[in-house]
Amino acid sequence: MNLKDYIRSIPDYPKKGILFRDITTLIKNSDAFNFAIDKILEISKKTEFNKIAGIESRGFVFASVVSYKLKKPLIMMRKKNKLPADKHSVDFELEYGKATIEIHKDSLAKGDKVLIIDDLIATGGTAEAGGKLVEISKAKVAGFIFIINLFDLGGDKKLKDKSYFTESLIEFPGH
């Protein structure tokens, strides 16, 4: 199955000059969604981890299923002010602005190895911030799995340059 066939491209969203790769068309097709989950599970065997983190919001869709299938705890990396308890926060740059993600301080412990899952990597700002949240918590990043890598925007390379394990199911140019 070619997952690229299930990704909708929307020009000039969320702002002019951005070509948005929409995964909702993949998620609504049960065959494509199940295929993507199976591929993530296959890739996850390449690294050792005891917890899974999903990045808000589309990363939750995939990470929650993987967490269920592998019977491993799920950690939510949320946008600013969405978590009610004490939290760690990291500010970062997006291709089209600035943002903050957070996790509860009690989500991770020293020695935890965390697999981070998200729908897409572009410039790498969100993923890198997710990695920093893990490290602030004294845990280790086991790796990253993405559905889509926008290969010409450099995020995947940025993570690999930091010696992180990273894989994606499909690749597109970012523009």
Image (cartoon, helix red, strand yellow):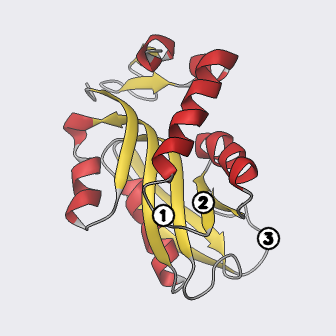
Task: Report the mark closest to the observer, 1 or 2.
Answer: 2
Placement of 5 over or under 106, stated as above or below: above
Q: Secondary structure at mark 2?
A: strand
Callout 3, which amino acid? Pro
Q: Is residue 132 visible?
A: yes
Q: Could you tell me which secondary element the residue under label 3 belongs to?
A: loop
* Residue bearing the label numbered 3: 84
Which amino acid is tagged 1? Gly
Q: Which image quarter: residue 122?
A: top left
- Residue in the image at 29% along x and 59% along y: 159
Instruction: Name the residue that disc number 1 marks.
Output: 130
Instruction: Please state which of residues 16 and 23 is positioned toward the viewer in this rendering.
Output: 23
Distance in Å between CA atoms under marks 3 and 1: 18 Å
Q: Is residue 29 visible?
A: no
Number of callouts: 3
Quadrant in which residue 85 is drawn: bottom right
The residue positioned 25% from the left and 58% from the top of the image is 160
Residue with the most extreme top position: 5
| C-beta proximity under 8 Å, tags 1 and 2 | yes
**Quadrant containing the C terminus in the rendered view:** top left
Q: Which residue is mark 2?
A: 53
- What is the C-alpha distance between the residues marked 1 and 2? 9 Å
Label 1 secondary element: helix
Q: Residue at x 58, y 34 (%)?
A: 38
Characterize the local packing of mark 1: few (<14), some (14-19) or many (20 or more) Cα atoms within 10 angstroms.
Answer: many
Q: Is residue 87 left or right of residue 100?
A: right
In percent of width and height, residue 140 lies at: 46, 77
* Nearer to me, 157 or 95: 157
Can you give x and y, in whole percent of width and height, for residue 8 in the image? 48, 14
| Crowd tier of the residue under label 2, counting other residues whose Cα lies within 10 Å: few below 14, some 14–19, many 20 or above | many
Q: If you read the primary sequence from the N terminus, does the residue marked by circle 3 or circle 1 appear first?
A: 3
In front of the other: label 3 or label 2? 2
